[in-house]
Amino acid sequence: MANSFSKEERVAFENILEGFQDALVLSKNVGIYTTDQVMMERTNDTIWRPMPYIGTSINAAPGTDISALYSDYVQLAVPSSISYSKAVPFTLNALELRDALQEDRLGAAAKNKLASDINVAIMDVAAAQGTLVVKRTAAATGYDDVAQCDAIMNEQGVPDYDRHLALSSRDYNGMANDLSKASRSFGNEKSDSAYERSRVGMVAGFDTLKLDYANRLTAAAGGGSLTIDTRDAATNYLVPAATQAVTGGTTNVDNRTQSVTISSTTGVAAGDAFTIAGVEACHHITKQSTGQLKTFRVISVTNGTTMVISPGIISNQVASDAAAQYQNCIVTGAAAAAITFLNTVTTSVNPFWQRDSLELLPGRYSVPADAGAAVLRGTTDNGIELVMQKFYDINTMTTKYRCDTLFGVVNKQPEMSGIMLFSQT
């Protein structure tokens, strides 16, 4: 006969689920995509999610005949996987169970850890894959810092709503300090909340969040003499493609990254941020230059001269419909264009993003309820499922508990997310 939960345990689980939902602070600020779990099992827990279309226009004048000017649209997609399987196991023996509070305490600890795992996963993806890089030479001070995040997004055509900025505790408090002094006449809500609760709130169109943990990015060690050939003949540019031919058919292509050849990858590491001389960012819709160098991130190093970067250099140097549609930069070709690293001092990473760029994929375990273990499950408002199981071992008079959650995180559009680095040289 299967074990069954007592009334107290059910109430405890409901409290755990409620607290779990409250603790999912970051997951409430990213997109949610609910998948068909049967389909996900049959596709190795991976689904391709579409990137936003970018429209292009043509000049129809003189006259109205555009019959020779039609072009194809290329729909790009990115692989999204349910790849995080997190569990918190614990045991209580028959003596420990005499104190019912033990279950509550351990359950609360499990809830906090699983919620933290989800938040950390979102931050890891945002911090590692965001390609809009804002470098600040001083410590965090306030509005001017966030305004730079606003500017880099606006210049490249990122939607101006649902923007979020997650700051390390020290950087967040540095901004709150500035706000607390902005108006010394107490009674000003913004100043009061900054002084009393170190609360920053909405700044320059970004909803700010405080992190009690933050990723660290080490100083780049690639040196100051690295170069890349940006001439057409070097083919260090990307022509986006929706699919590619494989034996027996076609498969989708992930266009978020590109492999490039540079003078040397010695000292270069994943996460490094850099610019390339003569490669300026352009507005993704108008295709006009922003006058600012395009920022890139190193995703991985392949060998002594090859590395994988994000985003790809989509410059339309060799004209094509796909490159014209997704063009993200304007290149002035050079045989040895200088690479300049932006992460010059080891520091905390402060990710910022537009909601649609990051996506959380809730998963679901199919746990049998008649296999000897008691099972309780609950789902948060944003679809994240928490499963609690209990199994009693008569030999040792020990009860095993486990709390589980299954999910995935994807950065669908790295050019709609980025990082801010403070105190850089």
Image (tube, rainbow, N blue to C red):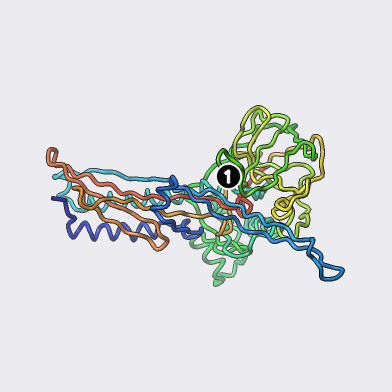
- Residue 310: x percent and y percent? 64, 44
Q: Residue at x 41, y 56 (%)?
A: 36
> Can residue 180 be seen in the rendering of this structure?
no
- The single residue placed furthest to the right in the displayed view is 62
Is residue 247 or residue 197 the one in the foreground?
A: 247
Is residue 177 or residue 410 the one in the foreground?
A: 410
Q: Is residue 224 left or right of residue 180?
A: right
Q: Residue at x 69, y 53 (%)?
A: 326
Q: Residue at x 60, y 66 (%)?
A: 184
> Can residue 400 be seen in the rendering of this structure?
yes
Q: Is residue 76 left or right of residue 37?
A: right
- Count of marks overlaid on the render: 1
Secondary structure under the numbered disc 1 in the rendered image? strand
- Residue 59: x percent and y percent? 81, 64
Q: Is residue 89 left or right of residue 129?
A: left
Q: Residue at x 54, y 54 (%)?
A: 49
Location of residue 147 with respect to 400 vertically, above or below? below
Answer with the quarter of the image where residue 302 lies.
Answer: top right
- Residue 70: x percent and y percent? 75, 61
Report the amino acid beneath label 1.
Thr
Answer with the quarter of the image where residue 64 lies.
Answer: bottom right
Location of residue 297 with respect to 287 vertically, above or below? above
Question: Which residue is denoted by mark 1 in the rendering?
Answer: 250
- Residue 322: x percent and y percent? 70, 52
